[in-house]
Amino acid sequence: MIKKDIIIYYPSFEKGGATINLINFANLSSKRNNVYLISNINNKDKRNFFSKQINLYKISNFSFKLISNRLITSLLSIYNMIKIFNKIGSKNSIIVSFQSHIVSIFICKIFGRKIIIRNSEDVLGATKYADYKIFAYLVMFLKTIFYFLSDAIITNSKKAKNSLQKITFYKKKIDLIYNPYLIKIKKIKSKKRKNIILSVGRLCKQKNQELLIKAFSIFLKKYPDYKLVLIGHGADKVKLANVCNNLKIMNKVEFKGWLTNPNYYYENSKLFVFPSLYEGLPNALIDSVNNELPCISSKCSGAEDILTNKYGTFSNTYDYNLLSKKMIDSIKNYNNSLKKVKKIKYYLHRFLAKEQISKYLSLTNKILSK
């Protein structure tokens, strides 16, 4: 069998759930193919996260106050793409873009290369909740134009797929493939969990932690011995801390920042709450279910794929009174909450990395054979 040359495009290496999907895809793909990674990853992270078989084409880190780092790395990546194109032929090579798709599509079309892009969010949701509406609508317009020029589009949830289909005329190019996230499904021993409400995600408008904090302040009136733990970093930390201070609950809320390994909290918390405004497919919910941690989520894209409509517990993105009621009910009827998350876990195999990466690779074969 002839090895394929898979060029993975991820110019801005950012630690988080999306990056784990990338790492799993790169490492498992490199067992049967030649894999090239275009990224600004440092050498330490390359050694820690990626197989030695992966060829790194490193982008220099350069910052400029008036331009976002992601845009800069995308522009600098063009040199690396051309360098790889000059090295390997086009017959058995394909680009899989995990980020900054407009740049990668544009260069691929110039050089006659085939490209698959991975759309990782609900396009309409991202536009609806954007801070800079004019810019957001411009980006959505550019996606409508450029995504059509790609050879295939991978999207990771039913809602994200529907969102793409509403704004485009390239429906046949869209494939739903879930995140290649989990390496294995855990076997959990029953244990006494601590009185912790957990939430994981960047501290930003999208993740909607302000709603959770307000709901938690009401929840405390019923269960005053609980703490809220927020894992993640972001620009909204000061704003969220001020909300806690105004509600006089700062002593009940812990900001843990970004943690390399948050497993302790997934294993020991009593309830996970995910109030996000929009997503693609939230890996944090997958982790919660894998640890048999009962969940409450908004109906953001991906949440229903993971939690299922039958067993999932959902709230909305604007009513903190409703969310607090759901939290209280989940703790009050905790045995039932545990039963529900165990039933949800039965469907978790859909997010195993090996199973989903085989679908990624089947799609690359399909595109290359055309």
Image (cartoon, rainbow, N blue to C red):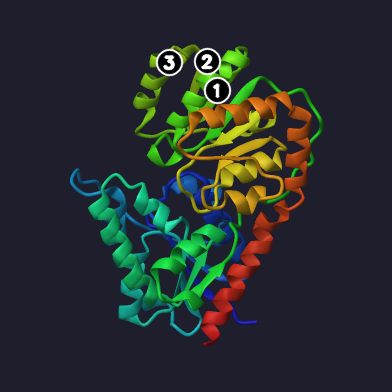
Residue drawn at (47%, 24%), measured in percent from left and top? 214
Badge number at residue 228: 1
Frontmost of labels 3 and 2 is 3
Where residue 190 appears, as percent x and y from the top left, is 81, 30
Q: How far across and how far down the image is residue 91, in percent? A: 48, 85
Task: Calculate the distance from the C-alpha at mark 2 to the C-alpha at mark 1.
Answer: 6 Å
Residue 82 visible? The answer is: no
What residue sits right under mark 3 in the picture? 247
The numbered disc on residue 252 is 2
Type of the residue with mark 2: Lys
The x, y position of residue 337, in whole percent, is 73, 34
Eyeballing the image, is 185 above or below 161?
A: above
Q: Which numbered disc, 3 or 2, marks the residue that appears first in the sequence?
A: 3
Question: Which of the image's four quarters has the N terminus?
Answer: bottom right
10 Å neighbourhood of mark 3: few (<14), some, or many (≥20)?
A: few
| Residue at image location 43% in from the left, 29% down from the top | 210
Please report contact status of discs 1 and 3: CB closer than 8 Å, yes or no.
no
**Front-most of residues 204 and 305:** 305
Task: Say what amino acid the circle numbered 1 marks.
Answer: Leu
> Picture quarter containing residue 221?
top right
Q: Please, is residue 94 above or below residue 225 in the view? A: below
